Image (spheres, coloured by chain):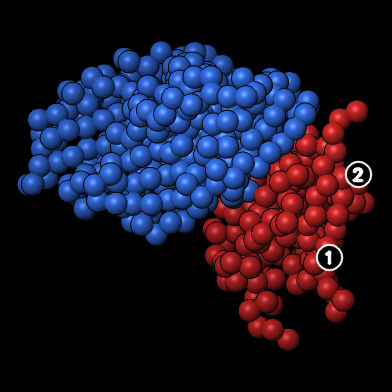
Amino acid sequence: MNKKVRVQATINGEDVEFLCEPRQSLLEVLRETLGLTGAKEGCNNGNCGACNVILDGALVNSCLVLAVEINGRNVTTIEGIATQQGLHPLQEKFIAHAALQCGFCTPGFIVASKALLDQNPNPSENEVRQWLAGNLCRCTGYDRIVRAVLDAAQVQEKPL
Amino acid sequence: MQVLDYISAGSLKEVVGLLASNNGRARILCGGTDLLVQLRENRRRVELLIDIKNISELTSINYDDQSGLWLGAAASCHAISQNRFVLENYPGLVDAIHLIGGVQIQYRASVGGNLCNASPAADSIPALIVHNAGCLIVGSKGTREIPVEQFCMAPGKNALQNGEFLLAVKVPPPKENFGVHYLRFIPRNEMDIAVVGAGASVTLDKAKQKILSARIALAAVAPTPLFVEEAGMFLAGREITEENMREAARIAQAAARPISDLRGTVEYRKHLCAVLTRRALEKAIERARAS
């Protein structure tokens, strides 16, 4: 029986506490222990971005973060992007532009795009493409995704 | 993946103590972008991971006119390439750091980790070599410093002895009429491993017509990042001419001893060595002239 460690963190604004083994990734704990299955396991080696979460403001692959490392820290997952008022503009625009087909990569793309817009509210097309280079989509050819992000930035710029 | 324990160390002394008491069974964890993948694929076995990201000396990025730039071994690629001073004064280093993975990787991966992982294709290492950078190493017997070109021993193997770890990378202060560039060839636009990479630094004379000194280093063409000292020695004291650039590129090409693999053949890599060395030199000279 491997030793388990107690971890306290804030996930999507809520204080959570869990036990995990030192070897477990944040992705594994989010999905298996906390029931947050929005972050997806694509490659499990840092290439595809499907497991993206925001850790203290930094965009990271949750498959390459150990769950024990998040003690005392703040995590946002895809489940924390929409609010009580409704979907985030990025989510609205992904739907409006049909920026997905199978949808497996979509949570990662939306979390990554959120991290971009948080620090650069009005990115150029080139900046969006560069930023999303670490997220792979095998269906769309990326163009609709890039257009959805640029469109969401426009909406965000002009608050309702 | 078998890891029995994890400790977030609070001081350098604690790291030294943990490495000594675990005698070869512990390993330093920084961004984990290489290490966690290697552990998961059972390419490495570790009982204890020592997280060094919460030690301020190890994450700091500092500068002073005497010793130059201090990059703590755990400073992330993102923190380094967003640092205003680094951006303005070390553009050749930023060229290389920007190529390491996507944003997600750059937020986690460190330049110190890129060095310790000792991949022949590591992008930051040729850029550090042409900057004449040094590795500051700590162990139970104290600290020692070695040039970056002596740090990698073989693919995945570095010069750290049992119980030692990398404290920082020290990059000399920028000089006048000095320029650096690093570039690589990959079949995609981003997110790939270098087929060949080339870094060059030059120091020009006051009139900016002649090369006073130069350094050239290559990635992915030998078991370790390759410092081609003879190419720089050839250029020292020579005019910036078409012929001299071509000869320096030919020397770099001759020094390369690549293998054929899925990324490219020996012949292709040899060809790239000359092309990329030439381009790295041209851009380094352009930057030196603009400095």
Q: Which mark is residue B4?
A: none
Percent from the top left, x then y, of residue B233?
18, 23
Dot 1 falls on a residue whose secondary structure is strand
Q: Can residue B259 be seen from the camera position used here?
A: yes
Q: Is residue B229 left or right of residue B193?
A: left
Amino acid type shown at disc 2: Glu
Q: Which chain is red?
A: A
The numbered dot on residue A14 is 1
Q: Is residue A76 above or below residue B66?
A: below
The local crowd at label 2, few if under 14, some if 14 to 19, many if 20 or more residues have their Cα within 10 Å, is few
Please name the residue shown 39% across and 59% down the image: B84
A54 to B189, vertically: above or below: below
Residue in the image at 82% along x and 69% along y: A82
The image quadrant that residue B196 belongs to is top left
- Asked if residue A80 can be seen in this view, the reply is no
Residue B230 image offset from top left, x and y in percent: 23, 19
- Residue B23 position within the rendered picture, expressed as x and y whole percent measured from the top left: 61, 19
Q: Is residue A135 left or right of residue B238?
A: right
**Going from the N terminus, do you reach mark 2 or mark 1 first?**
1
- Write down the residue under mark 2: A32
Q: Chain of mark 1?
A: A
Say whether residue B205 is left or right of residue B147: left
Secondary structure at badge 2 equals: helix
- Cα distance between the residues tagged 2 and 1: 18 Å
Chain under callout 2: A
What residue lies at 73% left-to-right and 56% top-to-bottom?
A72
